[in-house]
Image (spheres, grey):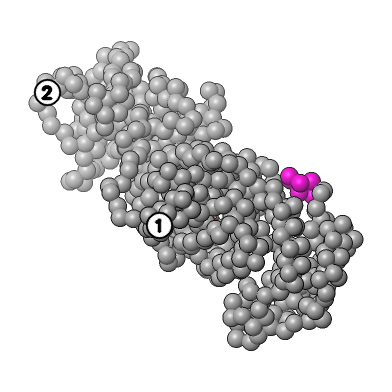
Amino acid sequence: MMSEERSLNFIEEIVEEDIAAGKHGGRVLTRFPPEPNGYLHIGHAKSICLNFGLAQKYNGQTNLRFDDTNPVKEDVEYVDSIKEDVKWLGFEWANELYASDYFDKLYEFAVTLIKKGLAYVDDSTAEEIAAQKGTPTEPGKGNEYRNRSVEENLALFADMKAGKFPDGAKVLRAKGDLASPNMHLRDPLMYRIKHAHHHRTGDKWCIYPMYDFAHGQSDAIEEITHSICTLEFVPHRPLYEWFIEQLELFPSKQYEFARLNLNYTVMSKRKLLQLVTDGFVDGWDDPRMPTISGLRRRGYTPASIREFCERIGVAKRENMIDVGLLEFCIREDLNKTAWRRMAVLDPVKLIIDNYPEGQTETLHGENNPEVEGGEGGRDIPFSGELWIEREDFMENPPKKYFRLGIGTMVRLKHAYIVKGESVVKDADGNITEIHCTYIPESKSGNDTSGINVKGTIHWISTEHAKEAEVRMYDRLFQVEDPSNEDGDFKDYINPNSLQVIEKAFIEPDLLNAVEGKPVQFIRKGYFTVDKTSTPEKLVFNRTVTLKDGWVKK
Ligand code: ATP
Ligand code: MG
Protein backbone atom coordinates (compact mmCIF):
# COMPACT_ATOMS: atom_id res chain seq x y z
CA MET A 1 0.00 0.00 0.00
CA MET A 2 2.33 2.74 -1.17
CA SER A 3 1.21 6.30 -1.65
CA GLU A 4 1.31 7.74 -5.13
CA GLU A 5 4.56 9.30 -6.33
CA ARG A 6 5.34 12.25 -4.12
CA SER A 7 7.88 15.01 -4.31
CA LEU A 8 11.07 14.77 -2.29
CA ASN A 9 11.01 15.87 1.32
CA PHE A 10 13.64 18.38 2.38
CA ILE A 11 15.94 15.74 3.85
CA GLU A 12 15.81 13.67 0.67
CA GLU A 13 16.72 16.81 -1.25
CA ILE A 14 19.79 17.27 0.94
CA VAL A 15 20.80 13.63 0.55
CA GLU A 16 20.42 13.80 -3.23
CA GLU A 17 22.54 16.94 -3.39
CA ASP A 18 25.21 15.28 -1.24
CA ILE A 19 25.23 12.19 -3.41
CA ALA A 20 25.43 14.31 -6.56
CA ALA A 21 28.35 16.26 -5.05
CA GLY A 22 30.10 13.01 -4.20
CA LYS A 23 30.15 13.85 -0.49
CA HIS A 24 31.42 10.89 1.59
CA GLY A 25 31.83 9.05 -1.71
CA GLY A 26 28.06 9.07 -2.16
CA ARG A 27 27.67 6.91 0.92
CA VAL A 28 24.50 7.19 3.08
CA LEU A 29 24.60 5.98 6.66
CA THR A 30 21.83 7.00 9.06
CA ARG A 31 21.07 5.87 12.58
CA PHE A 32 18.10 5.51 14.87
CA PRO A 33 19.24 6.44 18.40
CA PRO A 34 16.64 5.58 21.07
CA GLU A 35 17.32 5.93 24.74
CA PRO A 36 16.34 2.57 26.28
CA ASN A 37 14.22 4.16 29.00
CA GLY A 38 10.80 3.13 27.75
CA TYR A 39 8.92 1.49 24.91
CA LEU A 40 8.84 3.04 21.46
CA HIS A 41 5.81 5.05 20.44
CA ILE A 42 4.30 6.18 17.16
CA GLY A 43 6.57 9.25 17.20
CA HIS A 44 9.57 6.97 17.17
CA ALA A 45 7.98 5.08 14.27
CA LYS A 46 8.13 8.35 12.35
CA SER A 47 11.84 8.63 13.06
CA ILE A 48 12.43 4.96 12.24
CA CYS A 49 10.61 5.19 8.92
CA LEU A 50 12.54 8.32 8.05
CA ASN A 51 16.00 7.00 8.95
CA PHE A 52 15.60 3.49 7.59
CA GLY A 53 13.53 4.75 4.66
CA LEU A 54 16.30 7.13 3.54
CA ALA A 55 18.89 4.40 3.70
CA GLN A 56 16.69 2.02 1.69
CA LYS A 57 15.97 4.65 -0.91
CA TYR A 58 19.61 5.64 -1.39
CA ASN A 59 21.32 2.27 -1.08
CA GLY A 60 22.58 3.08 2.34
CA GLN A 61 22.46 1.54 5.78
CA THR A 62 21.11 2.39 9.20
CA ASN A 63 22.61 1.72 12.60
CA LEU A 64 20.49 1.01 15.64
CA ARG A 65 22.26 2.86 18.41
CA PHE A 66 21.10 2.78 21.98
CA ASP A 67 21.79 6.10 23.64
CA ASP A 68 22.46 4.55 27.02
CA THR A 69 24.36 7.30 28.81
CA ASN A 70 21.95 7.54 31.74
CA PRO A 71 22.44 4.38 33.84
CA VAL A 72 19.58 5.01 36.24
CA LYS A 73 16.57 4.99 33.94
CA GLU A 74 17.69 2.38 31.47
CA ASP A 75 16.97 -1.28 31.28
CA VAL A 76 17.47 -4.36 29.06
CA GLU A 77 13.71 -4.91 28.97
CA TYR A 78 13.53 -1.67 26.98
CA VAL A 79 16.42 -2.63 24.73
CA ASP A 80 14.69 -5.90 23.83
CA SER A 81 11.33 -4.26 23.19
CA ILE A 82 12.93 -1.61 20.96
CA LYS A 83 14.63 -4.27 18.84
CA GLU A 84 11.41 -6.21 18.53
CA ASP A 85 9.47 -3.12 17.49
CA VAL A 86 11.96 -1.96 14.84
CA LYS A 87 11.98 -5.45 13.31
CA TRP A 88 8.22 -5.68 13.44
CA LEU A 89 7.95 -2.40 11.55
CA GLY A 90 9.87 -4.14 8.80
CA PHE A 91 13.38 -2.71 9.11
CA GLU A 92 16.82 -4.24 9.50
CA TRP A 93 19.72 -2.40 11.03
CA ALA A 94 23.28 -2.74 9.83
CA ASN A 95 24.83 -2.67 13.32
CA GLU A 96 23.47 -2.87 16.84
CA LEU A 97 25.49 -0.32 18.79
CA TYR A 98 25.50 1.33 22.18
CA ALA A 99 26.75 4.76 23.21
CA SER A 100 28.22 2.91 26.20
CA ASP A 101 30.51 1.06 23.78
CA TYR A 102 32.21 4.41 23.35
CA PHE A 103 32.73 5.25 27.03
CA ASP A 104 36.49 4.65 26.75
CA LYS A 105 36.76 6.76 23.60
CA LEU A 106 34.62 9.51 25.06
CA TYR A 107 36.86 9.58 28.12
CA GLU A 108 39.86 9.98 25.82
CA PHE A 109 38.08 12.78 23.96
CA ALA A 110 37.49 14.55 27.27
CA VAL A 111 41.17 14.22 28.16
CA THR A 112 42.08 15.66 24.75
CA LEU A 113 39.88 18.68 25.37
CA ILE A 114 41.38 19.19 28.84
CA LYS A 115 44.85 19.09 27.31
CA LYS A 116 43.79 21.70 24.76
CA GLY A 117 42.64 23.91 27.62
CA LEU A 118 39.03 23.49 26.49
CA ALA A 119 37.59 21.63 29.47
CA TYR A 120 37.82 22.02 33.24
CA VAL A 121 36.68 20.39 36.43
CA ASP A 122 34.17 22.48 38.35
CA ASP A 123 33.35 21.93 42.05
CA SER A 124 30.25 24.13 42.00
CA THR A 125 26.85 22.75 42.88
CA ALA A 126 24.16 22.44 40.22
CA GLU A 127 22.44 25.51 41.71
CA GLU A 128 25.62 27.57 41.56
CA ILE A 129 26.25 26.57 37.99
CA ALA A 130 22.69 27.47 37.02
CA ALA A 131 22.99 30.84 38.77
CA GLN A 132 26.30 31.62 37.03
CA LYS A 133 24.91 30.75 33.60
CA GLY A 134 23.14 34.08 33.12
CA THR A 135 20.03 34.47 31.03
CA PRO A 136 19.52 34.59 27.27
CA THR A 137 19.91 38.39 27.48
CA GLU A 138 22.61 38.52 30.16
CA PRO A 139 26.02 36.88 29.82
CA GLY A 140 27.13 34.20 32.25
CA LYS A 141 29.89 34.57 34.81
CA GLY A 142 32.99 32.47 35.18
CA ASN A 143 34.19 31.13 38.51
CA GLU A 144 37.54 30.31 40.15
CA TYR A 145 37.52 26.70 38.83
CA ARG A 146 37.50 27.92 35.25
CA ASN A 147 41.12 28.96 35.62
CA ARG A 148 42.43 25.62 36.85
CA SER A 149 45.59 24.47 35.11
CA VAL A 150 45.60 21.66 32.59
CA GLU A 151 47.61 19.49 35.01
CA GLU A 152 45.18 20.06 37.85
CA ASN A 153 42.20 19.31 35.57
CA LEU A 154 43.82 16.11 34.30
CA ALA A 155 44.50 14.93 37.84
CA LEU A 156 41.03 15.81 39.10
CA PHE A 157 39.29 14.19 36.13
CA ALA A 158 41.32 11.02 36.69
CA ASP A 159 40.28 11.10 40.35
CA MET A 160 36.65 11.55 39.32
CA LYS A 161 36.98 8.44 37.19
CA ALA A 162 38.73 6.59 40.00
CA GLY A 163 35.75 7.13 42.27
CA LYS A 164 37.41 9.48 44.73
CA PHE A 165 34.43 11.86 44.93
CA PRO A 166 30.78 11.40 45.79
CA ASP A 167 27.92 12.02 43.34
CA GLY A 168 27.56 15.67 42.45
CA ALA A 169 30.85 16.78 44.01
CA LYS A 170 32.38 17.76 40.69
CA VAL A 171 31.59 17.97 37.00
CA LEU A 172 33.67 18.31 33.87
CA ARG A 173 32.66 21.28 31.75
CA ALA A 174 33.64 22.49 28.32
CA LYS A 175 35.24 25.90 28.23
CA GLY A 176 32.83 27.50 25.79
CA ASP A 177 31.65 31.07 25.45
CA LEU A 178 29.93 32.42 28.58
CA ALA A 179 28.53 35.32 26.58
CA SER A 180 27.10 33.24 23.74
CA PRO A 181 23.42 33.93 23.02
CA ASN A 182 23.15 30.15 22.73
CA MET A 183 22.93 28.93 26.32
CA HIS A 184 24.16 25.48 25.27
CA LEU A 185 27.57 26.98 24.52
CA ARG A 186 27.99 28.53 27.98
CA ASP A 187 30.36 25.97 29.41
CA PRO A 188 28.09 22.93 29.04
CA LEU A 189 28.56 19.90 31.27
CA MET A 190 30.44 17.00 29.72
CA TYR A 191 30.67 14.53 32.61
CA ARG A 192 28.94 14.02 35.93
CA ILE A 193 29.71 11.70 38.82
CA LYS A 194 27.15 8.96 39.33
CA HIS A 195 27.97 5.88 41.36
CA ALA A 196 25.41 3.76 39.58
CA HIS A 197 25.31 0.33 37.99
CA HIS A 198 24.93 0.43 34.21
CA HIS A 199 22.98 -2.28 32.39
CA ARG A 200 25.93 -2.91 30.07
CA THR A 201 29.12 -1.58 31.61
CA GLY A 202 28.25 -2.75 35.12
CA ASP A 203 30.29 -0.95 37.79
CA LYS A 204 33.19 -0.02 35.55
CA TRP A 205 32.27 3.65 35.51
CA CYS A 206 31.21 6.10 38.16
CA ILE A 207 31.36 9.06 35.79
CA TYR A 208 28.99 9.22 32.86
CA PRO A 209 29.08 11.49 29.79
CA MET A 210 26.20 13.89 29.32
CA TYR A 211 23.95 13.21 26.34
CA ASP A 212 25.35 16.30 24.61
CA PHE A 213 28.91 15.05 24.97
CA ALA A 214 28.04 11.56 23.74
CA HIS A 215 25.62 12.10 20.92
CA GLY A 216 27.56 14.03 18.30
CA GLN A 217 30.74 12.05 18.88
CA SER A 218 28.87 8.74 18.63
CA ASP A 219 27.65 9.89 15.20
CA ALA A 220 31.21 10.84 14.29
CA ILE A 221 32.71 7.56 15.51
CA GLU A 222 30.23 5.61 13.37
CA GLU A 223 30.79 8.01 10.45
CA ILE A 224 27.08 8.74 10.17
CA THR A 225 26.57 10.83 7.03
CA HIS A 226 23.15 12.24 7.87
CA SER A 227 22.22 12.47 11.51
CA ILE A 228 18.52 13.15 11.67
CA CYS A 229 16.76 14.27 14.80
CA THR A 230 13.89 16.39 16.03
CA LEU A 231 13.75 20.17 16.17
CA GLU A 232 14.51 20.60 19.86
CA PHE A 233 18.12 19.70 19.03
CA VAL A 234 18.64 22.67 16.70
CA PRO A 235 20.33 24.76 19.45
CA HIS A 236 22.54 21.78 20.37
CA ARG A 237 23.94 21.50 16.87
CA PRO A 238 26.63 24.21 17.26
CA LEU A 239 27.89 22.42 20.35
CA TYR A 240 28.10 19.05 18.57
CA GLU A 241 29.94 20.71 15.70
CA TRP A 242 32.32 22.45 18.09
CA PHE A 243 33.24 19.15 19.80
CA ILE A 244 33.71 17.41 16.45
CA GLU A 245 35.88 20.24 15.15
CA GLN A 246 38.03 20.48 18.26
CA LEU A 247 38.49 16.71 18.35
CA GLU A 248 39.07 16.53 14.59
CA LEU A 249 36.50 13.78 14.09
CA PHE A 250 34.43 12.66 11.12
CA PRO A 251 32.22 15.63 10.18
CA SER A 252 28.82 14.08 10.73
CA LYS A 253 26.01 16.55 9.98
CA GLN A 254 22.78 16.90 11.85
CA TYR A 255 19.42 17.73 10.23
CA GLU A 256 16.28 18.43 12.21
CA PHE A 257 12.63 17.74 11.44
CA ALA A 258 9.40 18.39 13.38
CA ARG A 259 8.46 15.71 15.85
CA LEU A 260 5.17 13.94 15.35
CA ASN A 261 2.43 15.11 17.69
CA LEU A 262 -0.78 13.13 17.67
CA ASN A 263 -4.00 14.37 19.25
CA TYR A 264 -5.93 12.63 22.06
CA THR A 265 -2.78 11.05 23.43
CA VAL A 266 0.52 11.79 25.10
CA MET A 267 3.81 10.73 23.65
CA SER A 268 6.61 11.37 26.07
CA LYS A 269 8.02 8.17 27.53
CA ARG A 270 8.03 9.79 30.96
CA LYS A 271 4.27 10.30 30.77
CA LEU A 272 3.61 6.91 29.24
CA LEU A 273 5.57 5.36 32.10
CA GLN A 274 3.30 7.14 34.59
CA LEU A 275 0.23 5.67 32.90
CA VAL A 276 1.78 2.23 33.31
CA THR A 277 3.06 2.57 36.88
CA ASP A 278 -0.10 4.32 38.13
CA GLY A 279 -2.23 1.55 36.63
CA PHE A 280 -4.26 3.65 34.20
CA VAL A 281 -3.47 1.11 31.52
CA ASP A 282 -2.63 -2.57 31.37
CA GLY A 283 1.11 -2.18 30.65
CA TRP A 284 3.16 -0.56 27.90
CA ASP A 285 1.34 -2.65 25.32
CA ASP A 286 -2.16 -1.76 26.43
CA PRO A 287 -4.11 -1.43 23.15
CA ARG A 288 -4.97 2.20 24.03
CA MET A 289 -1.32 3.23 24.29
CA PRO A 290 0.36 5.06 21.38
CA THR A 291 3.29 2.66 21.74
CA ILE A 292 4.27 0.41 18.85
CA SER A 293 3.58 -2.61 21.07
CA GLY A 294 0.18 -1.18 22.03
CA LEU A 295 -0.73 -0.57 18.40
CA ARG A 296 0.41 -4.10 17.53
CA ARG A 297 -1.75 -5.59 20.28
CA ARG A 298 -4.61 -3.40 19.12
CA GLY A 299 -4.36 -4.98 15.66
CA TYR A 300 -2.42 -2.36 13.71
CA THR A 301 -0.22 -3.71 10.94
CA PRO A 302 3.34 -2.58 10.16
CA ALA A 303 2.18 -1.55 6.67
CA SER A 304 -0.50 0.75 8.09
CA ILE A 305 1.98 2.50 10.39
CA ARG A 306 4.52 2.92 7.59
CA GLU A 307 1.78 4.33 5.37
CA PHE A 308 0.76 6.76 8.11
CA CYS A 309 4.36 7.98 8.47
CA GLU A 310 4.61 8.38 4.71
CA ARG A 311 1.39 10.38 4.54
CA ILE A 312 2.27 12.84 7.30
CA GLY A 313 5.53 13.62 5.52
CA VAL A 314 8.57 15.34 6.94
CA ALA A 315 7.84 18.82 8.25
CA LYS A 316 10.10 21.62 9.42
CA ARG A 317 7.53 23.07 11.76
CA GLU A 318 5.68 21.48 14.68
CA ASN A 319 2.05 20.58 14.11
CA MET A 320 -0.63 18.29 15.50
CA ILE A 321 -1.71 15.28 13.48
CA ASP A 322 -5.25 13.99 13.83
CA VAL A 323 -5.38 10.43 15.13
CA GLY A 324 -8.17 10.00 12.57
CA LEU A 325 -5.47 9.75 9.91
CA LEU A 326 -3.84 6.83 11.71
CA GLU A 327 -7.23 5.15 11.95
CA PHE A 328 -7.83 5.82 8.27
CA CYS A 329 -4.57 4.06 7.39
CA ILE A 330 -5.36 0.90 9.35
CA ARG A 331 -8.93 0.83 8.04
CA GLU A 332 -7.70 1.04 4.44
CA ASP A 333 -5.22 -1.76 5.02
CA LEU A 334 -7.62 -4.07 6.85
CA ASN A 335 -10.39 -3.50 4.35
CA LYS A 336 -8.15 -5.19 1.80
CA THR A 337 -6.80 -7.95 3.99
CA ALA A 338 -9.08 -8.81 6.91
CA TRP A 339 -11.31 -11.84 6.59
CA ARG A 340 -14.99 -11.23 7.19
CA ARG A 341 -16.82 -12.97 10.00
CA MET A 342 -20.01 -12.45 11.97
CA ALA A 343 -20.26 -11.60 15.64
CA VAL A 344 -23.20 -10.30 17.64
CA LEU A 345 -22.10 -7.97 20.39
CA ASP A 346 -25.45 -6.97 21.95
CA PRO A 347 -27.66 -9.98 21.32
CA VAL A 348 -31.42 -10.38 21.17
CA LYS A 349 -33.14 -13.58 20.05
CA LEU A 350 -34.78 -13.85 16.62
CA ILE A 351 -37.10 -16.81 16.09
CA ILE A 352 -38.17 -17.80 12.59
CA ASP A 353 -41.66 -19.17 13.13
CA ASN A 354 -41.99 -20.88 9.75
CA TYR A 355 -38.54 -22.49 9.67
CA PRO A 356 -38.83 -26.28 10.01
CA GLU A 357 -38.47 -27.29 13.66
CA GLY A 358 -35.05 -28.81 14.43
CA GLN A 359 -33.62 -28.11 10.95
CA THR A 360 -30.16 -26.68 10.43
CA GLU A 361 -28.33 -25.87 7.19
CA THR A 362 -24.81 -25.04 6.32
CA LEU A 363 -24.43 -21.77 4.47
CA HIS A 364 -21.33 -20.35 2.92
CA GLY A 365 -19.59 -17.00 3.13
CA GLU A 366 -16.49 -15.76 1.34
CA ASN A 367 -13.47 -14.73 3.38
CA ASN A 368 -12.74 -11.49 1.63
CA PRO A 369 -15.02 -9.87 -0.93
CA GLU A 370 -12.27 -7.32 -1.73
CA VAL A 371 -10.22 -10.02 -3.40
CA GLU A 372 -11.18 -11.78 -6.61
CA GLY A 373 -12.45 -15.25 -5.67
CA GLY A 374 -13.03 -14.15 -2.08
CA GLU A 375 -9.89 -15.90 -0.76
CA GLY A 376 -11.95 -19.02 -0.12
CA GLY A 377 -14.64 -19.09 2.50
CA ARG A 378 -16.11 -20.79 5.51
CA ASP A 379 -19.22 -22.70 6.50
CA ILE A 380 -21.80 -20.89 8.58
CA PRO A 381 -24.47 -22.94 10.39
CA PHE A 382 -28.02 -21.61 10.15
CA SER A 383 -31.14 -22.55 12.11
CA GLY A 384 -34.56 -21.24 13.08
CA GLU A 385 -33.28 -19.50 16.20
CA LEU A 386 -30.69 -16.77 15.85
CA TRP A 387 -28.96 -14.01 17.75
CA ILE A 388 -29.13 -10.62 16.11
CA GLU A 389 -27.94 -7.21 17.23
CA ARG A 390 -30.47 -5.44 19.45
CA GLU A 391 -29.95 -2.23 17.49
CA ASP A 392 -30.90 -3.98 14.26
CA PHE A 393 -34.55 -4.20 15.29
CA MET A 394 -37.21 -1.56 15.92
CA GLU A 395 -40.74 -2.29 16.91
CA ASN A 396 -42.06 0.83 15.22
CA PRO A 397 -39.46 1.64 12.59
CA PRO A 398 -39.42 5.13 11.09
CA LYS A 399 -39.61 5.51 7.32
CA LYS A 400 -35.99 5.11 6.32
CA TYR A 401 -35.08 2.36 8.74
CA PHE A 402 -33.71 -0.43 6.57
CA ARG A 403 -33.18 -3.00 9.28
CA LEU A 404 -35.78 -5.27 10.84
CA GLY A 405 -39.14 -3.99 12.11
CA ILE A 406 -42.58 -5.34 12.65
CA GLY A 407 -43.97 -5.71 9.14
CA THR A 408 -40.68 -4.83 7.41
CA MET A 409 -38.13 -7.05 5.74
CA VAL A 410 -34.39 -7.39 5.90
CA ARG A 411 -31.85 -9.85 4.53
CA LEU A 412 -29.87 -12.04 6.90
CA LYS A 413 -26.32 -11.97 5.54
CA HIS A 414 -25.50 -15.07 3.43
CA ALA A 415 -28.99 -16.42 4.25
CA TYR A 416 -32.64 -15.49 3.75
CA ILE A 417 -34.97 -12.52 3.74
CA VAL A 418 -37.07 -12.35 6.90
CA LYS A 419 -40.08 -10.24 7.91
CA GLY A 420 -40.72 -9.08 11.47
CA GLU A 421 -43.97 -10.37 12.96
CA SER A 422 -44.17 -9.87 16.72
CA VAL A 423 -42.19 -9.46 19.92
CA VAL A 424 -42.16 -10.96 23.40
CA LYS A 425 -41.30 -8.64 26.30
CA ASP A 426 -40.38 -9.13 29.92
CA ALA A 427 -42.12 -7.44 32.86
CA ASP A 428 -40.01 -4.30 32.38
CA GLY A 429 -40.97 -3.98 28.74
CA ASN A 430 -37.64 -5.14 27.34
CA ILE A 431 -37.81 -7.21 24.21
CA THR A 432 -36.70 -10.79 24.91
CA GLU A 433 -37.70 -12.43 21.62
CA ILE A 434 -38.47 -11.25 18.13
CA HIS A 435 -40.58 -13.48 15.95
CA CYS A 436 -40.36 -13.40 12.19
CA THR A 437 -41.07 -15.44 9.09
CA TYR A 438 -38.62 -16.22 6.32
CA ILE A 439 -38.97 -16.45 2.56
CA PRO A 440 -37.61 -19.89 1.58
CA GLU A 441 -36.98 -18.83 -2.07
CA SER A 442 -34.80 -15.90 -1.04
CA LYS A 443 -31.66 -17.85 -0.16
CA SER A 444 -28.49 -15.86 -0.94
CA GLY A 445 -26.88 -16.97 -4.16
CA ASN A 446 -30.09 -18.62 -5.32
CA ASP A 447 -32.75 -15.99 -4.76
CA THR A 448 -35.87 -16.51 -6.87
CA SER A 449 -38.17 -14.53 -4.60
CA GLY A 450 -38.08 -11.34 -6.66
CA ILE A 451 -38.14 -9.38 -3.41
CA ASN A 452 -35.77 -6.46 -3.03
CA VAL A 453 -34.74 -5.38 0.42
CA LYS A 454 -32.48 -2.47 1.28
CA GLY A 455 -30.85 -3.75 4.45
CA THR A 456 -28.69 -6.71 5.40
CA ILE A 457 -27.95 -7.67 8.99
CA HIS A 458 -25.61 -10.18 10.59
CA TRP A 459 -26.64 -13.02 12.89
CA ILE A 460 -25.42 -16.13 14.70
CA SER A 461 -27.38 -19.37 15.07
CA THR A 462 -28.00 -19.70 18.83
CA GLU A 463 -27.42 -23.43 18.84
CA HIS A 464 -24.03 -23.02 17.13
CA ALA A 465 -22.91 -19.77 18.70
CA LYS A 466 -19.55 -19.59 20.46
CA GLU A 467 -18.76 -17.04 23.11
CA ALA A 468 -16.02 -14.46 23.33
CA GLU A 469 -15.07 -11.44 25.35
CA VAL A 470 -14.81 -8.34 23.20
CA ARG A 471 -12.90 -5.25 24.26
CA MET A 472 -14.01 -2.00 22.71
CA TYR A 473 -11.43 0.74 22.86
CA ASP A 474 -11.85 4.43 22.53
CA ARG A 475 -9.40 7.33 22.76
CA LEU A 476 -7.41 7.34 25.96
CA PHE A 477 -7.88 11.07 26.50
CA GLN A 478 -10.92 13.31 26.29
CA VAL A 479 -9.05 16.36 25.05
CA GLU A 480 -6.87 16.88 22.01
CA ASP A 481 -3.72 17.90 23.83
CA PRO A 482 -3.77 16.63 27.43
CA SER A 483 -0.22 17.88 28.04
CA ASN A 484 -1.33 21.44 27.34
CA GLU A 485 -4.27 21.63 29.74
CA ASP A 486 -4.39 22.98 33.28
CA GLY A 487 -3.40 20.54 35.98
CA ASP A 488 -2.12 17.04 35.42
CA PHE A 489 -2.43 15.35 32.04
CA LYS A 490 -3.91 12.32 33.79
CA ASP A 491 -6.95 14.38 34.81
CA TYR A 492 -8.06 14.20 31.18
CA ILE A 493 -8.15 10.44 30.79
CA ASN A 494 -11.30 9.24 29.07
CA PRO A 495 -13.14 7.13 31.69
CA ASN A 496 -14.84 5.18 28.90
CA SER A 497 -11.74 4.35 26.92
CA LEU A 498 -12.33 0.64 27.49
CA GLN A 499 -15.65 -1.11 27.42
CA VAL A 500 -15.66 -4.82 27.93
CA ILE A 501 -18.39 -6.95 26.43
CA GLU A 502 -18.16 -10.05 28.59
CA LYS A 503 -20.25 -12.26 26.39
CA ALA A 504 -20.56 -11.70 22.68
CA PHE A 505 -21.63 -14.43 20.27
CA ILE A 506 -19.36 -15.34 17.42
CA GLU A 507 -19.64 -17.73 14.51
CA PRO A 508 -17.89 -21.09 15.09
CA ASP A 509 -15.20 -20.45 12.51
CA LEU A 510 -13.84 -17.65 14.69
CA LEU A 511 -12.47 -20.35 17.00
CA ASN A 512 -9.72 -20.52 14.36
CA ALA A 513 -8.81 -16.85 14.74
CA VAL A 514 -5.21 -16.25 15.73
CA GLU A 515 -3.22 -13.38 17.15
CA GLY A 516 -1.79 -11.15 14.46
CA LYS A 517 -4.43 -12.00 11.87
CA PRO A 518 -7.13 -9.33 12.04
CA VAL A 519 -10.74 -10.01 11.11
CA GLN A 520 -13.67 -7.83 10.23
CA PHE A 521 -16.78 -8.43 12.29
CA ILE A 522 -19.23 -7.57 9.57
CA ARG A 523 -20.82 -4.16 10.17
CA LYS A 524 -19.04 -3.82 13.53
CA GLY A 525 -15.42 -3.05 12.85
CA TYR A 526 -12.00 -4.66 12.66
CA PHE A 527 -10.92 -6.93 15.49
CA THR A 528 -7.94 -8.98 16.48
CA VAL A 529 -7.27 -11.75 18.97
CA ASP A 530 -5.74 -10.40 22.18
CA LYS A 531 -2.57 -11.90 23.61
CA THR A 532 -4.51 -12.99 26.72
CA SER A 533 -6.95 -15.03 24.65
CA THR A 534 -7.11 -18.80 25.25
CA PRO A 535 -9.12 -21.52 23.49
CA GLU A 536 -11.31 -21.71 26.62
CA LYS A 537 -11.83 -17.96 26.75
CA LEU A 538 -11.47 -16.07 23.53
CA VAL A 539 -10.71 -12.37 23.77
CA PHE A 540 -10.93 -9.94 20.87
CA ASN A 541 -9.73 -6.34 20.70
CA ARG A 542 -11.45 -3.83 18.51
CA THR A 543 -8.76 -2.32 16.33
CA VAL A 544 -10.91 0.34 14.70
CA THR A 545 -14.49 0.99 13.74
CA LEU A 546 -15.57 0.62 10.10
CA LYS A 547 -16.26 4.32 9.78
CA ASP A 548 -14.99 7.31 11.65
CA GLY A 549 -17.73 7.57 14.23
CA TRP A 550 -15.98 9.62 16.85
CA VAL A 551 -17.79 12.66 18.22
CA LYS A 552 -16.28 15.32 20.42
CA LYS A 553 -17.71 15.10 23.90
P1 ATP B 1 10.41 10.92 24.55
O1 ATP B 1 10.34 12.35 24.99
O2 ATP B 1 9.12 10.38 24.06
O3 ATP B 1 11.07 10.05 25.55
P2 ATP B 1 12.84 11.10 23.16
O4 ATP B 1 13.12 12.02 22.04
O5 ATP B 1 13.46 11.37 24.46
O6 ATP B 1 11.29 10.93 23.24
P3 ATP B 1 14.56 9.03 22.27
O7 ATP B 1 14.58 7.62 22.67
O8 ATP B 1 15.66 9.90 22.72
O9 ATP B 1 13.19 9.63 22.76
O10 ATP B 1 14.34 9.19 20.70
C1 ATP B 1 14.93 8.42 19.70
C2 ATP B 1 14.74 9.10 18.39
O11 ATP B 1 13.36 9.24 18.09
C3 ATP B 1 15.31 10.51 18.44
O12 ATP B 1 16.04 10.74 17.25
C4 ATP B 1 14.11 11.39 18.53
O13 ATP B 1 14.35 12.63 17.95
C5 ATP B 1 13.05 10.57 17.80
N1 ATP B 1 11.71 10.90 18.28
C6 ATP B 1 11.27 10.84 19.54
N2 ATP B 1 10.00 11.26 19.63
C7 ATP B 1 9.62 11.60 18.37
C8 ATP B 1 8.42 12.11 17.79
N3 ATP B 1 7.34 12.36 18.52
N4 ATP B 1 8.40 12.32 16.46
C9 ATP B 1 9.48 12.06 15.72
N5 ATP B 1 10.63 11.58 16.19
C10 ATP B 1 10.71 11.35 17.50
MG1 MG C 1 15.20 11.34 25.34
Quarter of the image where the C terminus is located: bottom left
Membership of 200 in magenta stretch: yes
Q: Where is residue 471 drawn, in percent x and y?
A: 48, 39
Find residue 336 and report its image quarter.
top left
Give the residue furthest to the right.
Answer: 164
Q: Which residues are magenta?
A: 197-202
Residue 342 is left or right of residue 108, and the answer is left
Majority secondary structure of magenta residues: loop
Report whether 155 appears left or right of 321.
right
- The local secondary structure at tag 1 comes to loop
Residue assigned mark 2: 449
> Disc 2 versus disc 1: distance between alpha carbons?
73 Å
Q: Amino acid at mark 1?
A: Ala
Q: Amino acid at mark 2?
A: Ser
Q: Residues within 10 Å of mark 1 (few under 14, many from 20)?
A: few
| Circle 1 residue | 21
Left or right, 25 with respect to 368, comes to: right
Which residue is located at x 39 percent, y 32 percent?
Answer: 519
Q: Residue furthest left?
A: 450
Q: Nearer the viewer, residue 240 or 331?
A: 240
Q: Can you give x and y, in whole percent of width and height, for residue 73 in the image?
A: 70, 53
The circle on residue 413 is none
Label located before the other in sequence (2 or 1): 1
Return the x and y of residue 103 as percentages of the image width and height: 73, 52
Q: Nearer the viewer, residue 5 or 260?
A: 5
Residue 434 highlighted magenta (yes or no): no
Specify whether residue 480 is in view: no
Q: Nearer the viewer, mark 2 or mark 1?
A: 1
Residue appearing at x 46%, y 61% in the figure: 257
Q: Picture quarter containing residue 131?
A: bottom right
- Location of residue 93 with respect to 422 vertically, above or below: below
Q: Dividing the image into 4 quarters, which one contains the N terminus?
A: top left
